[in-house]
Image (cartoon, rainbow, N blue to C red):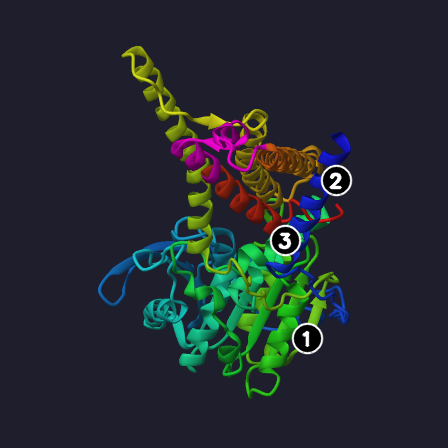
């Protein structure tokens, strides 16, 4: 009995492992083979502050709240100006990343430092009435931010021909659109730029975070199957936005900035793509700087790297000469391990709405079947109370335990998988490690999945025994003898019992396929 159960369990595991492998894409990112080598570790332009550029802290900074009028609405903003700075100064408009929105809370350090070096800065609020998690239009956002450029150009003390753009993270998908559409933009500063489309950047970031968290190899299968899926509920069209055509149209100097401790961005690949895209564009000289140990916001811990605002201010104030000043690539040596690339679309579960509906249907079947059976049992008891004979119903001996184990096990494993993935995601986003959660949690999920297969194996074997017994019993009866006693070896008796049986079996089978798809039954670790 034990050997038979083990053999059946192993057979089911192999079938599900194969099914999980063929139902969706694998994840095999390409390693970086050619690294971008900085010419020097010194990030200053030309190895020394360019002539004529003021140092950070030269001027006091005056802050003024402003209103930026957009098409159909308006947003607030914070203008920072160097007090008593001579002549008309260069200016820069800041474009928000995904994590910021209010001018009073974003870019405070760098905008203030730049203003203290003589650059007039304007941080507008992000327009949020057209910006949601599901729906973002980067070209429309570029048109909104263009109103801030117009406001800064018209400001007294600002050279309208020296107003540029500063974008961070998501904002670097917007800045090239603005600069390509408005040749009058003087320059662009791209900080922590993904460059690749959002879907590719998301997959790259997840891969990087998971590698740091030391997840088992099998968990990586979830990356293309989650990121490549059409998100349930629709939207997210911006996930495939390609900024490359706009980069290729740039005719202004570009400063590209990354921190070497930013795991979410393809720092070498992004810099190289911008260098390649602007290489043949007249006037679009590109300068690249890497800051050692700096994170996504070019900070070490919570402190802005001091050399960063110094270099940005010196570069902007010394244009056009600084656009081509050597070294072109400088700073700390980056170490991107894998390339960000296209994310394959799942073959079976590429439609997120269909996937969620399938799981909900499966859970509903597992829950509803026993509920119907419970109600029927209560009705049967009432019939006995009133003296009426209840209709025959029930499962054959040896079925109730395995069927319950199958249904409960499938539900418990799917819930455990969701809890595990959420826990790993939290660790990954915090860039932390916890072997008990990452390794231990995966073992627990897979053991729960294996226990569910044991219940399925017991059910299958018991079903085969009942079927054999029934066939043997029927064959032993006389040719014209009564066959009513065959009911004694039927798997299920009664309509509601059959309904419960097939409801749980169908729901559990669907969940087993889903679990196989997400790697719970894959062979190896």
| Residue topped by disc 1 | 328
| Residue topped by disc 2 | 7
Q: Position of residue 26 (x, y in %)?
A: 65, 60
Mark identifier at residue 81? none
Label 1 crowd bin: few (<14), some (14–19), many (20+), radius 10 Å = many
| Magenta stretch: includes residue 490 | yes
| Residue topped by disc 3 | 20
Q: What SS does tag 1 mark?
A: loop
User: How far separated are the C-alphas under marks 2 and 1?
Assistant: 64 Å
User: Going 31% across and 60% down the picture, which residue do you hit?
Assistant: 130
Label 2 crowd bin: few (<14), some (14–19), many (20+), radius 10 Å = some
Relative vertical location of residue 509 with respect to residue 26 in this rendering, above or below = above
User: Going 48% across and 78% down the picture, which residue do you hit?
Assistant: 246
Residue 55 in sight here:
no
From the image, which quarter does the C terminus lie in? Answer: top right
Q: Is residue 50 left or right of residue 407?
A: right
User: How far separated are the C-alphas under marks 3 and 2?
Assistant: 20 Å
Looking at the image, is mark 3 or mark 2 nearer the viewer? Answer: 2
| Mark closer to the chain start, 1 or 3 | 3
Relative vertical location of residue 506 with respect to residue 385 in this rendering, above or below = below
From the image, which quarter does the N terminus lie in? Answer: top right
User: How far separated are the C-alphas under marks 1 and 3?
Assistant: 48 Å
Residue 421 in sight here:
yes
What span is colored magenta in the figure? 477-502
Q: What SS does tag 3 mark?
A: helix
Q: Position of residue 467 (x, y in %)?
A: 59, 37
Outermost residue toward the left in this view: 72
| Mark closer to the chain start, 2 or 1 | 2
| Mark closer to the chain start, 3 or 2 | 2
Q: What SS does tag 2 mark?
A: helix
Of 242 and 126, nearer the camera is 242
Looking at the image, is mark 1 or mark 3 nearer the viewer? Answer: 3
């Amino acid at each position: 009995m034990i050997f038979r159960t083990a053999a059946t369990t192993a057979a089911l595991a192999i079938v599900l492992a194969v099914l999980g492998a063929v139902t969706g894409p694998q994840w095999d990112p390409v390693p970086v083979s050619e690294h971008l080598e900085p010419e020097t570790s010194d990030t200053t332009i030309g190895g020394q502050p360019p002539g004529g550029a003021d140092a950070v802290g030269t001027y006091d900074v005056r802050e003024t709240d402003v209103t930026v009028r957009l098409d159909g609405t308006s947003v607030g903003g914070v203008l920072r100006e160097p007090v008593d700075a001579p002549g008309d100064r260069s200016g820069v408009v800041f474009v928000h990343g995904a994590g910021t929105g209010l001018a009073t809370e974003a870019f405070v350090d760098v905008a203030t430092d730049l203003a203290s070096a003589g650059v007039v800065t304007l941080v507008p609020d992000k327009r949020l009435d057209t910006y949601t998690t599901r729906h973002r239009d980067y070209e429309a956002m570029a048109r909104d931010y263009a109103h801030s450029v117009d406001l800064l150009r018209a400001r007294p003390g600002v050279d309208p021909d020296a107003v540029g753009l500063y974008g961070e993270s998501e904002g670097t998908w917007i800045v090239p659109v603005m600069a390509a559409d408005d040749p009058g933009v003087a320059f662009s500063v791209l900080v922590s730029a993904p460059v690749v489309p959002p879907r590719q950047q998301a997959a790259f970031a997840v891969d990087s975070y998971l590698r740091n968290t030391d997840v088992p190899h099998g968990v990586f299968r979830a990356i293309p199957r989650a990121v490549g899926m059409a998100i349930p509920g629709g939207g997210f069209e911006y996930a495939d936005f390609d900024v490359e055509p706009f980069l290729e149209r740039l005719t202004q100097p570009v400063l590209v900035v990354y921190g070497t401790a930013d795991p979410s961005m393809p720092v070498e690949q992004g810099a190289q793509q911008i260098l390649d895209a602007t290489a043949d564009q007249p006037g679009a000289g590109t300068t690249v700087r890497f800051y050692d140990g700096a994170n996504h916001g070019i900070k070490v811990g919570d402190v802005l790297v001091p050399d960063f605002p110094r270099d940005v201010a010196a570069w902007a104030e010394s244009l056009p000469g600084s656009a081509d000043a050597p070294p072109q690539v400088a700073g700390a040596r980056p170490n991107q391990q894998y390339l960000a690339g296209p994310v394959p679309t799942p073959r079976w579960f590429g439609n997120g709405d269909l996937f969620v509906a399938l799981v909900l249907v499966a859970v509903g079947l597992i829950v509803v079947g026993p509920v119907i059976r419970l109600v029927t049992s209560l009705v049967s008891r009432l019939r006995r109370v009133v003296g009426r004979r209840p209709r025959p119903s029930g499962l054959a001996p040896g079925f109730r335990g395995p069927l319950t184990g199958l249904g409960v096990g499938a539900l418990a494993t799917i819930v455990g998988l969701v809890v595990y993935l959420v826990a790993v995601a939290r660790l990954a986003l915090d860039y932390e490690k916890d072997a008990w959660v990452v390794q231990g949690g995966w073992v627990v999920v897979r053991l729960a999945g294996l226990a569910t297969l044991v219940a399925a194996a017991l059910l299958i074997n018991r079903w085969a025994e009942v079927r054999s017994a029934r066939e043997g019993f029927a064959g032993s009866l006389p040719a014209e003898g009564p066959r009513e006693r065959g009911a004694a070896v039927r798997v299920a008796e009664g309509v509601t019992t059959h309904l419960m049986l097939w409801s749980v079996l169908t729901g559990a089978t669907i969940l087993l396929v889903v679990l196989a798809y997400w790697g719970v039954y894959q062979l190896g670790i």
